[in-house]
Image (tube, rainbow, N blue to C red):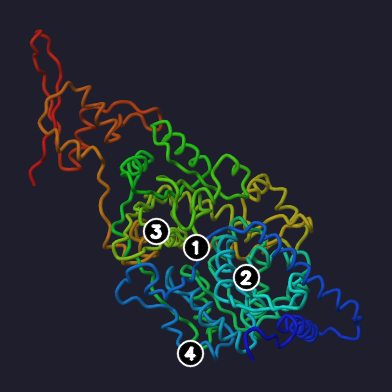
């Protein structure tokens, strides 16, 4: 039977929904006789109406993005291949034909996870009349995958229509998508909204699929701190583990994958691993202050681009304003479109077009750290102020190298012991303590009320992501995925405090990065090499140290910075292999002045 012919209306989509509804009734011990035919049809119509409205909204907000799955094979797609590259398709082979239950594709970016789903599993599912649901963590990624589906499933068809010019019925050509009823691409957030509005209908919809593909599954941990509904999609997918084939894909969802392995929940042979490929990282350097970060940006040459991830909206503004005050105009700023502050910053479509950055300097919050790929040879520097290794692994994954020569330098903010301890205390106080109290007292209404009336409780719960007030129920609820996120971050911080921040951060991302660490050299050192032994009035040298080396008066602390003393400047220079001389010198007019000069220490 040809592609153009249809076995059932909508390829059996309605039939499968009816079967799924019957299965749901049986599993929930619902007596079919208790439902009238009208009620059954109403439930199915609710599902279809919800889907229709959602897809209409998405098409109206469609984004033009480059395909994840190229026209060519990945080894030849618009780039010189990197040697000995292995892809998920190579690992899986023919296994997918016998999958059932949990399947894990534990692999880094650019390893062909989505390529395998769309180029291998999808055609097989189409031929065997099976259906696939792909869930994504970001709308941009959903649009990108759906565009690929439409292209890969494109076929020429014809239909009969009356032609008034010819006065008869003629065949007219058209383009159809043969995969239209084999695959759906949605977001986790869409599923969560569906579950909130009609849980029964949403679960019925899920059961109409043979494969549930959870892409970027680290979403269940990384987004739990700001999304109150992550638990809903997690639990709904979990219910399908034993009856459907559930494929989980991520480079940084190891907390889940390791736990499933430990509990022997993954069927034998259905856990596929490929290490992250960081050959494109040319070097890794740690910076310590805002001034270091500014120096890194200032060093970007014409034709090069830099991507900077900041911690807060306040820092985004400050960095933007400082750079523009210095005359660096080609700066873009991006934050989540759902934030109130989004109006004052750039839009994603203005920042990234066709996977290419549109500005020399791009400053962004974590909104850009996953779900978006950058195939941009000019992107030579990535800077991150974030401490979490899972987040940083995703940040580095934004760069998709085009060939071996497409490299990038990485700069990471160093977190001192005091700051790590502060992060740890915040997690314990605002995330884990409320959970402990909830589990201990919530079922005892009197004890829970007493906890809520403690002086600190209100402030703690304002900052808590683990125990939050459900506005629909008017009750506090325990968010388990946010708790998992807090527990994972607590372990990371404890290990960093014990083993050292820089080493532990890079080990958690990928141990290969440890060999690429280099010391960040201040721009002052290059200047000094060109001006050794030059005697200058001491205040001239002070200004140079202040501006190029950010050497300040040690006594300033957090106050406004002032010029450094000879003693402190000399200590700083000696750390880098230089020394600072000083003497009184008589000038032609007869007056004496203090002069300084810089020499290089012998090895």
| Circles 3 and 2: CB atoms closer than 8 Å | no
- How many other residues sit within 10 Å of disc 4, few (<14), some (14-19) or many (≥20)? few
Q: Position of residue 579 (x, y in %)?
A: 14, 36
Foreground mark, 3 or 2, reads: 2
Q: CA distance from mark 3 to mark 2?
A: 39 Å
Residue that numbered label 4 is attached to:
94
- Front position in the image: 416 or 339: 339
Rendered residue at 70%/80% (across/down): 207
> Is 511 situated above or below 543?
below
Q: CA distance from mark 3 to mark 4?
A: 42 Å
Secondary element under disc 4, as helix, strand or loop, is: loop
Residue that numbered label 1 is attached to:
66
Residue that numbered label 3 is attached to:
496
Q: CA distance from mark 1 to mark 2?
A: 17 Å
Residue that numbered label 2 is attached to:
185
| Quarter of the rendering containing residue 154 | bottom right
Q: Is residue 458 left or right of residue 273?
A: right
- Front position in the image: 575 or 84: 84
Residue furthest front as drawn = 166
Closer to the chain start, of discs 1 and 4, is 1
Foreground mark, 1 or 4, reads: 1
Secondary element under disc 1, as helix, strand or loop, is: loop
- How many other residues sit within 10 Å of disc 3, few (<14), some (14-19) or many (≥20)? some
| Circles 1 and 2: CB atoms closer than 8 Å | no
Q: CA distance from mark 2 to mark 4?
A: 24 Å
Is the N terminus in the top left, top right, bottom left or bottom right quadrant?
bottom right
| Quarter of the rendering containing residue 56 | bottom right
Rendered residue at 33%/67% (across/down): 511
């Amino acid at each position: 039977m040809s592609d153009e012919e249809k076995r059932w209306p909508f390829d059996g989509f309605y039939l499968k929904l009816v079967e799924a509804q019957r299965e749901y009734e049986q599993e929930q011990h619902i007596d079919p006789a208790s439902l009238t035919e009208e009620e059954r049809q109403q439930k199915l119509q609710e599902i279809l109406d919800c889907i229709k409205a959602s897809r209409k909204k998405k098409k109206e907000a469609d984004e033009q993005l480059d395909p994840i799955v190229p026209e060519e094979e990945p080894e030849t797609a618009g780039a010189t291949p990197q040697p000995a590259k292995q892809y998920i398709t190579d690992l899986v082979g023919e296994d997918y034909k016998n999958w059932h239950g949990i399947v894990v594709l534990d692999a880094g970016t650019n390893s062909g996870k989505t390529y395998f789903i769309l180029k291998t599993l999808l055609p097989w599912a189409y031929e065997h009349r099976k259906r696939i649901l792909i869930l994504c963590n970001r709308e941009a990624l959903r649009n990108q995958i759906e565009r690929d589906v439409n292209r890969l499933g494109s076929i020429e068809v014809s239909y009969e229509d009356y032609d008034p010019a010819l006065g008869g019925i003629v065949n007219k050509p058209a383009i159809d998508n043969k995969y239209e009823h084999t695959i759906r691409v949605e977001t986790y957030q869409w599923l969560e909204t569906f579950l909130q509005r009609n849980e029964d209908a949403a679960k019925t919809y899920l059961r109409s699929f043979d494969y549930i593909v959870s892409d970027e599954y680290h979403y269940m941990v990384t987004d739990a701190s700001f999304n109150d509904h992550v638990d809903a999609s997690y639990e709904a997918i979990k219910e399908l583990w034993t009856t459907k084939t559930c494929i989980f894909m991520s480079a940084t969802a190891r907390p889940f994958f390791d736990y499933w392995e430990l509990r022997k929940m993954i069927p034998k042979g259905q856990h596929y691993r490929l290490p992250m490929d960081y050959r494109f990282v040319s070097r890794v350097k740690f910076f310590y202050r805002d001034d270091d970060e500014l120096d890194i940006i200032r060093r970007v040459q014409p034709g090069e681009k830099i991507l900077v991830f900041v911690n807060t909206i306040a820092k985004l503004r400050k960095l933007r304003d400082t750079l523009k005050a210095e005359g660096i105009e080609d700066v873009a700023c991006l934050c989540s479109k759902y934030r109130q502050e989004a109006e004052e910053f750039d839009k994603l479509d203005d920042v990234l077009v066709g996977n290419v950055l549109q500005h020399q300097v791009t400053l962004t919050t974590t909104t850009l750290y996953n779900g978006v790929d950058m195939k941009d040879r000019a992107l030579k520097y990535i800077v991150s102020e974030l401490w979490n290794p899972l987040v940083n692994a995703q940040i580095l994954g934004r760069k998709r190298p085009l060939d071996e020569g497409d490299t990038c330098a990485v700069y990471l903010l160093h977190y001192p012991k005091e700051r790590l301890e502060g992060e740890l205390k915040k997690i314990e106080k605002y995330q884990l303590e409320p959970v402990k109290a909830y589990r201990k007292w919530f079922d005892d209404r009197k004890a829970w009320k007493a906890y809520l009336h403690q002086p600190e409780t209100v402030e703690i719960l304002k900052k808590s992501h683990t125990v939050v007030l459900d506005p629909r129920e008017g009750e506090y609820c325990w968010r388990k995925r946010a708790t998992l996120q807090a527990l994972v971050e607590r372990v990371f911080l404890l290990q960093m405090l014990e083993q050292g921040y820089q080493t532990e951060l890079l080990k958690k991302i990928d141990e290969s990065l440890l060999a690429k660490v280099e010391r960040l050299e201040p721009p002052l050192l290059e200047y000094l090499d060109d001006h050794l032994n030059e005697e200058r009035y001491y205040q001239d040298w002070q200004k140079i140290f202040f501006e190029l080396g950010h050497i300040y008066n040690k006594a300033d602390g957090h106050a406004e910075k002032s010029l450094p003393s000879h003693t402190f400047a000399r200590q700083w220079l000696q750390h880098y292999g230089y020394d600072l001389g000083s003497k009184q010198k008589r000038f032609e007019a007869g007056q004496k002045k203090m002069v300084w000069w810089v020499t290089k220490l012998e090895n």
